[in-house]
């Protein structure tokens, strides 16, 4: 896929450029990112260079992974990053992190919504998957704020630093954002709201 740029009211999302190496390197020194995100530890400048100049363009070229730098305006600082990995013909999995100095302002949720709308309307995605290690409440808060439905806990569902860990799993569908789906969706009865019971007239009593 050709790299694309997305814009929101406050943000510009574009594929990482070589100029981002220093900011990516600085952001990934954050202990919170190293705790939950599978980045190398220690995170060296060479790791940021490899990610930005090799992994990002290769992923766009072979449609295996789409990574966005999230900027506060076209010339603003890096405030977050959003990545997408293909999961079969119809789904993608999303991951994200926020720069520590820019947390608490809603930038990550705003970026995730922009990426989700693009995936559903332009990239043919019909299910966007979210996973996070159990305990990663910051990631879960973003997921819930943007409309993901938490579907449960996958035991040993995530490998992190050569260890299998339990993870929360959720998904976002086009219909959750009021968008049409490329494929029809027939939910199971248990996924649909239960109908209200018929009113019962008890006034006559026995």
Image (spheres, rainbow, N blue to C red):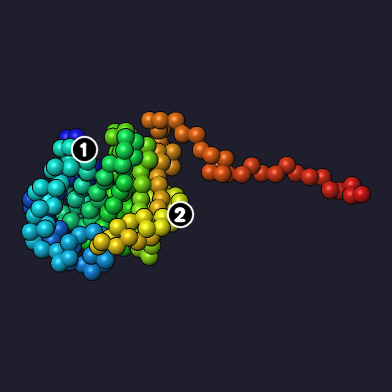
Who's the residue at 82% across and 45% down the image? 201
* Rendered image quadrant of residue 190: top right
* Rendered image quadrant of residue 21: bottom left
Residue bearing the label numbered 2: 152
Sequence-first disc among 1 and 2: 1
Q: In this view, does 144 lie to the left or right of 89?
A: right
Residue 86 coordinates in the image, percent (x, y): 28, 41
Q: Which residue lies furthest to the right in this view?
A: 206
Residue 57 coordinates in the image, percent (x, y): 13, 43
* Rendered image quadrant of residue 37: bottom left
Secondary structure beneath dot 2 equals strand
In the image, 26 versus 163, the foreground residue is 163
Q: Which residue lies furthest to the bottom in this view?
A: 31
Give me the C-alpha separation between circle 1 and circle 2. 29 Å
The circle on residue 191 is none
**Number of numbered discs on residues:** 2
Secondary structure beneath dot 1 equals loop
Crowding at mark 1 (Cα within 10 Å: few <14, some 14-19, many 20+): some
Residue 155 coordinates in the image, percent (x, y): 41, 58
Who's the residue at 38% across and 30% down the image? 182
Q: Is residue 171 left or right of residue 123?
A: right
* Above or below: residue 28 compared with residue 198: below
Q: Which image quadrant: the N terminus?
A: top left
Residue bearing the label numbered 1: 63
Q: In this view, does 184 lie to the left or right of 124?
A: right
Any part of residue 120 in sight:
no
Any part of residue 151 in sight:
yes
Who's the residue at 9% across and 49% down the image? 53
In the image, 11 versus 182, the foreground residue is 182
* Above or below: residue 7 compared with residue 26: above
Residue 150 coordinates in the image, percent (x, y): 44, 52
């Amino acid at each position: 896929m050709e790299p694309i740029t997305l814009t929101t009211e406050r943000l510009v999302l574009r594929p990482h450029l070589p100029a981002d190496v220093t900011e990516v390197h600085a952001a990934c020194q954050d202990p919170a990112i190293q705790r939950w995100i599978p980045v190398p530890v220690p995170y060296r400048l060479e790791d940021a260079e490899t990610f930005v100049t090799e992994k990002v363009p290769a992923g766009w070229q072979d449609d295996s992974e789409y990574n966005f730098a999230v900027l506060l305006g076209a010339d603003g600082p890096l405030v977050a990053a959003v990545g997408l990995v293909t999961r079969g013909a119809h789904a993608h999995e999303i991951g994200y992190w926020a720069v520590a100095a820019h947390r608490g302002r809603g930038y990550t949720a705003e970026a995730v919504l922009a990426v989700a709308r693009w995936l559903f309307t332009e990239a043919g995605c019909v299910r966007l998957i979210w996973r996070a290690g159990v305990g990663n409440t910051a990631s879960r808060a973003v997921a819930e704020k943007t409309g993901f439905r938490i579907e449960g806990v996958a035991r040993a569902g995530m490998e992190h630093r050569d260890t299998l860990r339990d993870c929360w799993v959720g998904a976002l569908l086009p219909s959750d954002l009021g968008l049409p789906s490329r494929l029809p969706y027939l939910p199971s009865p248990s996924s649909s709201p239960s109908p209200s019971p018929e009113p019962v007239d008890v006034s006559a009593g026995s």
